[in-house]
Image (cartoon, helix red, strand yellow):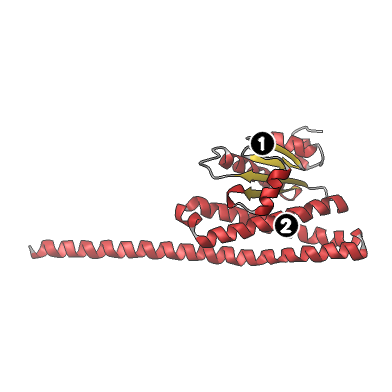
Amino acid sequence: MKIRRRIFGAAFLITAFLLVTILFLGSVMNLERKDYIEEKMSILSDLNEIQTYSMLSDVYGNRLACLAFKKKLTEWDKTLWDLGLKLERYRAATEEFQKDPFYLDQKKRFNENQVLYMAFLTKAKKDCEFDVSIVSFFYKNSEECVKCDAQSFVLTDLKRELNDEVSIFSFDVDLEITNIGLLQQYYEITEFPCVVVNEQPFCGMQDKSFIIRKMCESNNNSACERYAIN
């Protein structure tokens, strides 16, 4: 009887220890996620520099502003893309994390900064004749949009293949951000997923070859030759 009580007691202690360990690790992982995202979000304050570059354009002309734009836009593009992937990985990793107020706040800030960056990149593309394709992706939650995740995978593969030749922006319509709503109205987006390739909207699921063909209509990139698109 004493031995049985000892066994039960030991089992209870082991179970309690494992439970506490799991809860602690879960808490640490969430803190690490938050610390990482918070650190990366601070980098996005660099977007304020875009306003300075815009002023340089007004005062000194496009040549000086374009030199500044070209140097910084590559850095910002990689930062935004990497952070966007990180946020989506955390969203997919745990249902609780995507309901976290911190996560939602950071994702809203991320989407708002994407709108700002995309607007200035579009301006720089026109004023400075940058040879880069701009793709924006409008999506909703997977319950309402069963193909949105699949479209995201296609765009991730496209970005991996073309790297700096394309800038891809992902906009979560469910966040109900005013500027994203305005873009949605401007492009007359009523179906999801929806991609906008160099100012042309194409709603419904689009494969990589279709998107590349549309990109090649206005921009020449390395994929055009590989896919024999002129």
Q: 222 or 65, which lies in front?
A: 65
Tell me which corner region of the image, top left, top right, bottom left or bottom right, holds residue 116.
bottom right
Residue most extreme to the left: 1
Disc tally is 2
Q: 207 or 45, which lies in front?
A: 45
Is 126 rendered above or below residue 23?
above
Q: Residue at x 45, y 55 (%)?
A: 96
Quadrant for the C terminus in the image: top right
Residue type at mark 1: give it. Answer: Cys
Is 163 rendered above or below residue 12?
above
Residue type at mark 2: give it. Answer: Leu
Camera sees residue 169: no
Q: What secondary structure is found at the residue carrying circle 1?
A: strand
Tell me which corner region of the image, top left, top right, bottom left or bottom right, holds residue 76.
bottom right
Residue identifier under label 1? 203
Quadrant for the N terminus in the image: bottom left
Tell me which corner region of the image, top left, top right, bottom left or bottom right, holds residue 50.
bottom right
Q: Position of residue 19 (x, y in %)?
A: 32, 62
Is 36 rendered above or below residue 139?
below
Q: How many other residues sit within 10 Å of disc 1, few (<14), some (14-19) or many (≥20)?
A: some
Q: Residue at x 65, y 40 (%)?
A: 194
| Image position of 188 (left or right of 40) | right
Q: Residue at x 53, y 62 (%)?
A: 102
Q: How many other residues sit within 10 Å of disc 2, few (<14), some (14-19) or many (≥20)?
A: some
Residue identifier under label 2? 116
